[in-house]
């Protein structure tokens, strides 16, 4: 039996990068996949088709995770279309990097809204489904930057640290109903966000990583499979760093 067979997952921000890798990996393990992004574009359509090629149900939704109303509607729509939501992966996120002295109020507010408020929005909305099921796994995408901080990323670090505190609190609140909540803190993962970094910056980061390589989106997706499956049935309130030993 496939690890995620019979389950339905909702993944935000899954048209590309880590979110896409998670969606494809989940399909490979037999999971039905609902995923959202701001727009239903060509990328979303291609991901939708690739997911279906594994013989599972898939549907893409255009939804703004940073909107409370849109998130509530998304959960209702997915519940109506799939009949259940066993796993929620809060993956949507952006960066607006800048030193604090140059950071605008809008850069701060937007990152907090998209990265942190979205986690509140979706988790609050999905709990009504999971409480009724008396089962669920919520996986929140944090970052090693949220654990250790990073110059020029105070807004991003604050949003990702907030996710960790939120994750631990929800694990305590919902644990008695058999709902687990964990966070993943990726390190240097090769995505569109890191593609434009200068070569010397990338080389420095790699030299600081004990495994001497950057991470792949699939490395994060594999941990998501573990946290979404019954293999992690006694794991909750944890932060798993996927960083090649960079943050130890």
Image (spheres, grey):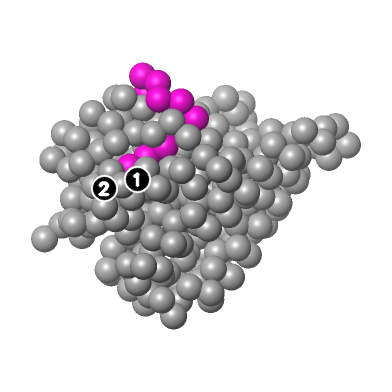
- Dot 1: element: helix
Is 244 left or right of 32, judged from the image as shown? right
- Identify the residue at horizontal 56%, vertical 51% (top origin): 121
Q: Is residue 56 magenta?
A: no
List the residue tagged with mark 1: 78
Residue occupying the point 59% across, 41% down: 66
**Mark number displayed over residue 31:** none
Tell me whether circle 1 and circle 2 mark residues in contact (CB < 8 Å): yes
Picture coordinates of residue 142, whole percent (x, y): 55, 53
Query: Can residue 51 be seen?
Result: yes
Using residue 57 as the reference point, say whether residue 38 is left or right of it. right
Q: Residue at x 45, y 62 (%)?
A: 127
Residue most toward the bottom?
176
Left or right: 42 in relation to 112:
left
Q: Position of residue 150 (x, y in %)?
A: 71, 47
Q: Which residue, as the protein is rendered here, is positioned at the far top?
A: 42
The image quarter in which residue 81 lies? top left
Is residue 38 found inside the magenta-colored segment of the image? Answer: yes
Q: Which residue is mark 2?
A: 82
Q: Quadrant of residue 52?
A: top left
Q: In this picture, which residue range is highlighted in magenta?
A: 34-43
Residue at image position (28%, 69%) is 231
Indicate the position of residue 79 as horizontal and vertical percent values. 33, 50
Out of 131 and 118, give the one closest to the viewer: 131
**Label 1 Cα neighbours within 10 Å, binned few <14 / some 14-19 / many ≥20:** many
Observer-nearest of 18 and 36: 36
Image quadrant in which the C terminus is located: bottom right
Whether residue 121 is situated above or below residue 64 in the rendered picture: below
């Amino acid at each position: 039996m496939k690890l995620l067979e019979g389950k339905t997952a909702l993944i935000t921000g899954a048209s590309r990068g880590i979110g896409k890798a998670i969606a494809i990996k989940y399909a490979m393990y037999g999971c039905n996949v609902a995923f959202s992004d701001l727009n239903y574009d060509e990328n979303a359509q291609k991901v939708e088709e690739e997911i279906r090629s594994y013989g599972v149900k898939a549907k893409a939704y255009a939804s703004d995770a940073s909107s409370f109303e849109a998130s509530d509607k998304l959960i209702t729509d997915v519940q109506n279309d799939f009949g259940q939501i066993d796993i929620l992966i809060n993956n949507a996120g952006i960066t607006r990097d800048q030193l604090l002295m140059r950071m605008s109020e809008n850069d701060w507010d937007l990152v907090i809204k998209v990265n942190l408020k979205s986690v509140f929005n979706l988790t609050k909305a999905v709990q009504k489904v999971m409480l009724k099921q008396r089962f669920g796994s919520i996986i929140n995408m944090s970052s090693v930057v949220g654990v250790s901080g990073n110059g020029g990323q105070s807004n991003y670090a604050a949003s990702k640290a907030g996710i960790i505190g939120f994750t631990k609190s929800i694990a305590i609140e919902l644990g008695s109903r058999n709902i687990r909540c964990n966070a993943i803190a990726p390190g240097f993962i090769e995505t569109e966000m890191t593609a434009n970094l200068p070569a010397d910056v990338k080389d420095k980061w790699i030299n600081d990583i004990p495994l001497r390589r950057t991470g792949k989106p699939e490395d994060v997706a594999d941990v998501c499979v573990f946290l979404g499956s019954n293999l992690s049935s006694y794991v909750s309130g944890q932060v798993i760093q996927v960083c090649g030993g960079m943050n130890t």
